[in-house]
Image (cartoon, coloured by chain):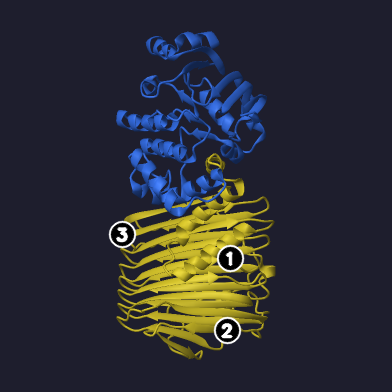
Chain colours: A blue, B yellow
Amino acid sequence: MSTLEIRDLHVAVEAKEILRGVNLTVAAGQTHAIMGPNGSGKSTLAYAIAGHPKYTITSGQVLLDGVDLLELSVDERARAGLFLAMQYPVEVPGVSVSNFLRSAVTAVRGEAPKLREFAKDLKNGMDALSIDPAFAQRNLNEGFSGGEKKRHEILQMELLKPKIAVLDETDSGLDVDALRVVSEGINRFRADGETGVLLITHYTRILRYVKPDFVHVFAGGRIVEEGGPELAEKLEAEGYEQYTKASA
Amino acid sequence: MGLNEKPLSTLHEKASFELGDFEVPNGREESWRFTPLSRLKGLHNGKAEPVGHVRLDVDAAPEVTVETVGRDDARLGKAFAPTDRVSAQAWHGFEKATVITVPREAVASKHTVLTLTGSGDGAAYGHIVVIVEPMAEAVIVLDHRGSAVYADNIEFAIGDGASLRVVSLQDWDDDAVHVSHHHALLAKDATFRSFVVTLGGDLVRLSPNVTYTAPGGDADMSGVYFADAGQHLEHRLLVDHSQPNCKSNVDYRGALQGEDAHTVWIGDVIIRVEAEGTDTYELNRNLILTDGARADSVPNLEILTGEVAGAGHASASGRLDDEHIFYLQARGIPYDEARRLVIRGFLGQLIEKIEVEEIRERVLTAVEAELAR
């Protein structure tokens, strides 16, 4: 069973400290929600774990099954079993979705998938997420609506089968139908209990569809409160105000 | 426009078949300031004696006629007059010209390939005329290979309602020097599609230009270039809109890698007073892959009429986008492959437009080979 351990993580952007000592352990079979106000450092946590070059780790460790991810390149982290569903997936001109997905699956599995199997997996995955099959021939994220981009992120997660998935505000900008489709995808992904999910969100709405085991409140670059699903309900009722005041 | 700069329309106005009408360029002229004259091997100053050979082999569609003619053939020099010294030098330097004719209403059943092979034995000058008679359609491939010091003019005379598609591939050996002018003259409702691919050669300076003799002409010019260390690849486009209701579209993209890889793209578009209803757009993008490479990109749009349907231009040169690479790497794709995918995607969007499959495949393979270096 896999475990992601974040130990006293400090992260800076252009010499400004954003994360100030994050401690969190996500085990396979668990879903953790990280909630917090805008600017609290939630997305920084996601991108720092994934290895985005903009973020500088000043101290701490991020271990996936004992391997320090911070020592690995971005692609090595992904191949080690980490997945980041991005809030704003970038458009890549001239690279088709099918070509991209095949390259990614080949890299993560260490061998090229059989064409027929891959085509079948892709079709099933797209059907389940109500993605138009014509998407496979389009350029990566180019001209996709917000909802299409998010579904496509979940499709990648389902195809790549990571050990730990970090979902960065996957619910933002989705209408209720799209939220339901995306949530079903996340629930399929975690159903076998062999994967861990770290769900970063601003709103409690998605938590009605994707039930968390643990809820962490993020403010001022660290976790300031932890609890079970009931904490989300409290946030729903009271908002983030008490935390933003405390951290300011 | 600065005080010392002349309007675009005056830069191109001098046209003459007399060599003496053009001064030997010294490198300070607007049209020569990017070109390293010392590497032209005398093509610009008359010192390149025509002692070398560039062999021309033609594999023509059955509907097309191919003739080798002398300098006095009346069909030469109809679609253009030289507007710079090297073009005039080439006009005076060739011995035999090749005239390709697509007869009236003929639709060529296959593409016609002109393979030009340099034998590396000195300077040579060439002249080719492609005449597409009214309502005819053809695809012409110009395939430049080998080693050469070569200057030429190519005329494309496209008749009423006719269509010509040209692919010009500059796949020279590393030491080649090539200065070329493509002159397209579009009659009423003529269609011209040009696709330029420049990969090889020490110095290539290619000037495709388009003029219209009647309304309704439609020109689309695409180009892909890949400059390695030390290469100078220069493309100078001119579209001269002097007739109403004509269209032009230009999209050139380049990649550069290595020390002193240098590309130049000039996109001049003139919309003259009488050219009402013109619709034009020009775009140049460059990907600079390493330090020490330099891309110059200068779009110029001069509009002399108030009634245009559309006129725009854009130019962007920059490095690979970190966000693109990050996204692909975050899906497990190693850096080198991510880089290849992004660059191939950037150029591939244009390369996909090449309609001749074997050329398209060859260009994709060549780009892959450049990326593997």
The amino acid type, in three-letter code, at marker 3 is Gly
Which mark is nearer the camera, 3 or 1? 1
- Mark 1 element type: loop
Q: Residue at x 39, y 78 (%)?
A: B110
Residue that badge 3 annotates: B277
Q: Nearer the viewer, residue A52 or B32?
A: A52
The subunit letter for the residue under badge 1 reads B
- Mark 2 element type: strand
Q: Quadrant of the N terminus of chain A?
A: top right
Report if residue B351 is visible in the image. Answer: yes
The subunit letter for the residue under badge 2 reads B
Marking on residue B55: 2
Q: Nearer the viewer, residue A100 or B158?
A: A100
The amino acid type, in three-letter code, at marker 2 is Arg
Residue that badge 1 annotates: B199
**Is A219 rendered above or below residue B210?**
above
Q: CA distance from mark 3 to mark 1?
A: 36 Å
